[in-house]
Amino acid sequence: MGIRTERELNPPRQVHGTGARPLVRRALWIAGTALAFVLLAVLGLGLGSLFSFGEPARPEPEPAPTARSAPRPVAEPAPAPPPPRPSAPTPVAAPAPPPPAPATTPEQEPLIKPPALPLPARLQVRQAILRGIRELNDELARCPADPVTRTPPTARAALVLDAVAEAGAVRLANGQLDAEGPVNDRFVSCARSVLEGKQFAVSGAAPGTRLRLIIPLGANGNSLSIPSASLTEAAAN
């Protein structure tokens, strides 16, 4: 066996109660350390709130709203002018009363005017005109006498002459053809040239009286049927 040291030969004796002291000390040390850490943390927080390093971050201000131009005012249509008020009628002076009518009552014109030339006088004027036309037979015989057939033969055809009464005479004025069928136009033109403007002495017709002489044409339209002629008053215009 080897040589043992004095410690091994004589191990120290443990005193009763000394083994628990290191545990207590360790526990106190841990508790003190934890308490110191807590105090330091609280102190650091307090100092940090008192001394702030740098300014805290502030939110950037929102941009100011852009000013919009106000809409242009729209001109409202002018209100319609009120309708003109009717002006008060100007008082009109009452007309003077008409003068009293004369006592005599004017004669009223008859509804049917009497003929300007009574029937007996018209027959007398007709005879005088026809007598004067017969005296012109030689001139009428020189007119063209080519026969023309009318269809139908009874169709009306006559030479109508305007007549105007003058002082003691009757003058034949313009003439015109009134026919429903063909006639000898050359004969009619010649007969008009012979009769128009002729004057025949008559009596019983007031000057200015207008008449109409109707002389039928013959069946062949180339002659005047003088005995069948009629005389009427001209229609008033």
Image: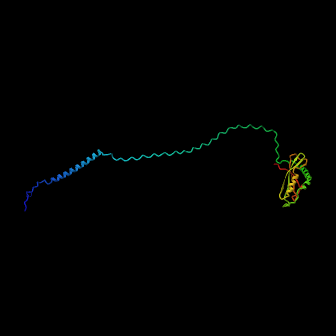
Residue extending furthest toward the bottom: 1
Instruction: State the image coordinates of residue 223 (x, y, percent, origin top left).
Output: 88, 57
Q: Residue at x 19, y 51 (%)?
A: 29
Instruction: State the image coordinates of residue 42 (x, y, percent, origin top left).
Output: 26, 47
Q: Residue at x 24, y 48 (%)?
A: 40
Camera-side residue: 2 or 80?
2
Q: Residue at x 16, y 53 (%)?
A: 22
Instruction: State the image coordinates of residue 137 (x, y, percent, origin top left).
Output: 91, 54
Q: How is the image coloured?
A: rainbow
Q: Residue at x 21, y 50 (%)?
A: 33
61 left or right of 92? left
* Up/down of 44 relative to 223, above or below: above
115 left or right of 65? right
* Up/down of 94 relative to 232, above or below: above
Camera-side residue: 169 or 62?
62
Quarter holding the N terminus is: bottom left
Camera-side residue: 142 or 76?
142
54 left or right of 82? left
Give the total number of marks visible in the rendering. Answer: 0
